[in-house]
């Protein structure tokens, strides 16, 4: 139970960092005004809007899942590890999508 609580606390900190990092990725679109650069504003806005929501959903889902497993007297820390890995995947997917949305010219 102690490991689960510690991992969920780490997941919460990671969620704040990932959500803030995804919002921070919106700064990549300031280079769209430079000559030769093209941007897909729809994709970028979608990523910056949906990304933090996905981060929050993963956090809430993992907390609820861990609590349910603990109530049933089962190991819950592996589920918390899955949540940590899922947050990393969500952040890097958002990073790749924003990178794909901004095309730098020569």
Image: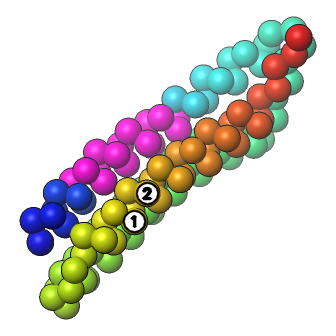
**Residue 72 in which image quadrant:** bottom left
How busy is the neighbourhood of tag 2: few (under 14 within 10 Å), some, or many (20 plus)?
Answer: few
Residue depicted at 25% across the width and 83% down the height: 68
- The disc at residue 82 is 1
Q: Quadrant of the N terminus?
A: bottom left
Magenta region? 9-23
Left or right: residue 22 versus residue 76 is right
**Residue 7 in which image quadrant:** bottom left
Q: Does the magenta run of residues contain 75?
A: no
Secondary structure found at label 1: helix
Asked if residue 100 can be seen in this view, the reply is yes
Asked if residue 30 is positioned above or below residue 10 in the image, the reply reads above
Asked if residue 31 is positioned above or below residue 71 in the image, the reply reads above
Left or right: residue 45 versus residue 60 is right
- The residue to which callout 2 is attached is 85
Asked if residue 55 is positioned above or below residue 79 in the image, the reply reads above
Residue depicted at 72% across the width and 16% down the height: 31
Secondary structure found at label 2: helix
Residue depicted at 61% across the width and 39% down the height: 95
């Amino acid at each position: 139970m102690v490991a689960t609580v510690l991992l969920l606390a780490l997941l919460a900190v990671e969620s704040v960092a990932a959500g803030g990092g995804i919002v921070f990725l919106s700064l990549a679109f300031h280079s769209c005004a430079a000559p030769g650069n093209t941007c897909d504003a729809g994709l970028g806005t979608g990523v910056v809007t949906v990304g933090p929501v996905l981060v929050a959903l993963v956090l809430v889902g993992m907390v609820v899942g861990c609590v349910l497993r603990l109530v049933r007297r089962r190991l819950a820390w592996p589920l918390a590890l899955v949540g940590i890995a899922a947050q990393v995947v969500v952040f890097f997917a958002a990073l790749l999508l924003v990178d794909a949305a901004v095309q730098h010219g020569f």
